[in-house]
Image: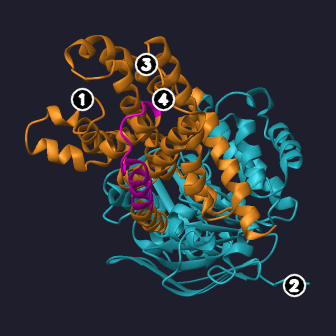
Chain colours: A cyan, B orange
Amino acid sequence: MRAVPDLAIETSGLCKSYGDVQALRSVDLQVPPGTVLGLLGPNGAGKTTAVRILTTLLPPDGGNARVVGHDVVRDAAALRAEIGLAGQYAAVDENLTGRENLVMVGRLYHLGRKHSRVRADELLERFELTDAAARPARTYSGGMRRRLDLAAALVARPPVLFLDEPTTGLDPRSRIALWETIEARVAGGTTVLLTTQYLDEADRLADSIAVIDHGEVIAEGTSDVLKSRVGGEKLEVTLEDPDQRRVAIDTLTPISGDEPPTCDGPIVRMPMRRERGGIAEAVRRLDSAGVGIADIAVRRPTLDDVFMTLTGHAAEPENGEGDEQEPAAEREEAAA
Amino acid sequence: MSALAMTVSDTLVLAQRNLMRIPRQPDLLVAYTIQPVMFVLLFVYVFGGAIQTPGFDYVDFLMPGIIAQSIAFGGFTTALGLSDDVRKGLIDRFRSLPMSRAAVLLGRTFSDIGLNCVSLVVLFSVGFVAGFNFIDASAGEIALGIVLLLLMGYAFSWVFALVGLYSSSPETANAIGFTALFPLTFASSMFVPADSMPDGLRQFAEANPFTTWTDALRSLWLDTPPHSDVWMSFVWIVVLIAVFAPLSVARYRRVVAR
């Protein structure tokens, strides 16, 4: 029997180039069994390339990668029996029905004809696709297709799941439903590597997040660790009268610590110190100085702030502005 | 499961999948049923009266040619299907499964054989209705003609596999396939006797493998003088497969490894 590896997914020094474009430069990742790693980055950061290498679709140029102990190059065939992949492009056969798609995948996992059918029906039921099971997948909504795609990835009950931008393009309701499904798999012990450009998605699903940009992991840790790098919580006071902001800043400076309060229109911001009573103290001081408060809130940094701090640009670049090449776009081009 | 058993099983699963898709794509269904029927009827009744085929009714002369043309184009589903599967990410799905690596291309090309059998039934049916008859052909000769056609169709599946893997869309596959092959089928003895053609074209038509295949079918089914054509037609099939199968496999490896 094979010893159970300590890490479900492990890479070191993983590199891949497409011509002059370095899609991955020395990526190290460690994912313990039963946890979720969120690979977070903008389009073209190298997320898809990493998934393609880990699922044996693409050979790396350099470095090592192992999934449940199997080397992605040397033990590719054995590795494939242990993984499920749900892709960005919802790879289901549109001309087959939902059931036919799942039975086909089961038979290609060599589950046998009968077992494949039983498994397909089980998954259709669990993913609430039973009513649509006999309809061609091309009649499905986006959310239904993603569910079918995810179901196909789960046919052989793989211990490791790769989800490449599983909710891109979905409406909010379908996203939340898919999140719940993924959470249920993880609760059952499945290891998940998830790529996403949505910060809230990584925040919600991932035990650990690796921020990737231009093919490099630029930060790693839990969502809390990453957020603390941006500098903790801020108190935001919205003034009734913006003209009072000078007074407000002077009043708050003594309790603001190293960083003085800043203002932006009617909003005055200051770092929140960790001690209790910070909000009450601020309110008391402003009140006795005669400053009217329209609103007061504690703002916790989001992963968006993390991304801005780490990369100097927002997580989601504006459409059509990316100067980086997304491997998928490159593929289409190369096929022409 | 042994590697061979796995390849056979996976190939059959994918071939079945490819065939299940056909009835659900009305455009393909039309291409494989109504279009050949239309061609037979147009040629027999529109051109037939004007084309001299000494010693034969035109419908007898025409049917081996038109059947060979239809079967050659049968592989076109491979071009469409492969280009579609690459674009939509299904190839990625297949390659992430613990299945035979050869099965994607084998399943694709084998399903064309099934499809071509359906085409043959349709074409023979309309041919008999239009007055086609075998002339002094034994059951063995008829069967050998059918085997020849199916093997030729299989060779063209590899030609079309390459077309599909070089095409960014089904439309491109369509354009490449038809502009390259359609004229080639007409510059042969498929529809008119080659000796009616002007110099240059005639020599081209005589060297054209479509002429070789069509003449082989005529010698088997219509008892035209036997010559080297029957075995030559098998040589052409072997040559096509020997050239296009390795090219397609090499191209497939490049396309998927991105």
Give the residue type that dot 3 points to: Val
Q: From the viewer's perspective, is residue B10 above or below residue A114?
A: below
Q: What secondary structure is the magenta-colored segment mainly?
A: helix
Separation (CA) of disc 2 from disc 3: 61 Å
- Chain ID of residue with mark 1: B
Instruction: Locate the N terminus of chain A by quadrant.
Output: bottom right
Instruction: Locate the C terminus of chain A by quadrant.
Output: bottom left
> Which residue is tagged 4?
B28
At label 3, counting other C-alpha atoms closer than 10 Å, the crowd grade (few under 14, some 14-19, many 20 or more) is: some
Q: From the viewer's perspective, is residue A262 above or below residue A64?
A: above
Determine if the magenta segment contains residue B238.
Answer: yes
Give the residue type that dot 1 points to: Val
Q: Which residues are magenta?
A: B221-241
Residue that protrudes farthest toward the left in the picture: B199
Q: Relative to the observer, which residue lies in front, A116 or B111?
A: B111
> Which residue is tagged 2?
A2
The residue lying at 77 percent from left, 44 percent from top is A103
Q: Position of residue A5 (x, y in %)?
A: 82, 84
